[in-house]
Image (cartoon, grey):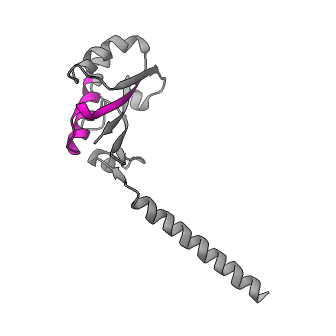
Amino acid sequence: MRALSVIALFAALTSAAQAQEQVASDETAGIRHIVTEDVKKLGLPFSSAVEVDGLIFLAGTLGTVPDGGLAAGGIGPEARQTMENIKSLLATEGLGMDRLVKCTVMLADIKEWPAFNAIYADYFDGYYPARSAFAASGLALGARVEVECIAKR
């Protein structure tokens, strides 16, 4: 019985050590979490972006203003504020909009696609990231648009 207990204890310690090694290797595997002050202040359960091997995965971005609410006025102001928020996050990493390689756009109403496009195009110099778009109901905060992006350092 004692031999079995020693074996069980050894197995438990080995599992714990392996779990600790996994955490350490994740931390040193080039994964970096970027958390903006807004996300910290609001205590939201996600990173603003995560960088892995020179790729920066931005969380879905809304047209929020500093007080945490949405830019007033519908799709136009929300779209512009969304793009400004993306631009600002990239700037904190020393990057510009030209470093975006992929964007996914979620619209509360796909009929607002032309209005979004008109604003989106202003943020690029003729070269655009690859992009997908779809209609989605129930965006956070009742938003009209949410944009998720991937950038390359």
Name above or below for residue 119 compared with residue 16.
above
Q: Is residue 98 left or right of residue 2?
A: left
Name above or below for residue 74 compared with residue 28.
above
Q: Is residue 6 left or right of residue 81?
A: right
| Quadrant of the drawing holding the C terminus | top left
Quadrant of the rendered image containing residue 84: top left
The image position of residue 54, as x and y in percent, is 33, 46
The image position of residue 99, as x and y in percent, is 26, 34
Q: Seen from this angle, which residue lies furthest right?
A: 1
Name above or below for residue 129 compared with residue 8.
above
The image position of residue 145, as x and y in percent, is 37, 24
The residue sitting at 32% across, 49% down in the picture is: 34
Q: Is residue 126 visible?
A: yes
| Quadrant of the drawing holding the N terminus | bottom right
The residue sitting at 54% across, 66% down in the picture is: 19
Name above or below for residue 66 compared with residue 46.
above
Q: Which residues are magenta?
A: 80-107
The residue sitting at 66% across, 80% down in the picture is: 9
The residue sitting at 25% across, 24% down in the picture is: 80
Quadrant of the rendered image containing residue 142: top left
Q: Is residue 21 left or right of residue 103?
A: right
Total of numbered circles in the picture?
0
Q: Is residue 105 left or right of residue 122?
A: right
The image position of residue 79, as x and y in percent, is 29, 23
Camera-side residue: 107 or 140? 107
Task: Check if residue 89 falls in the magenta segment.
Answer: yes
Task: Check if residue 49 falls in the magenta segment.
Answer: no
Q: Is residue 48 visible?
A: no
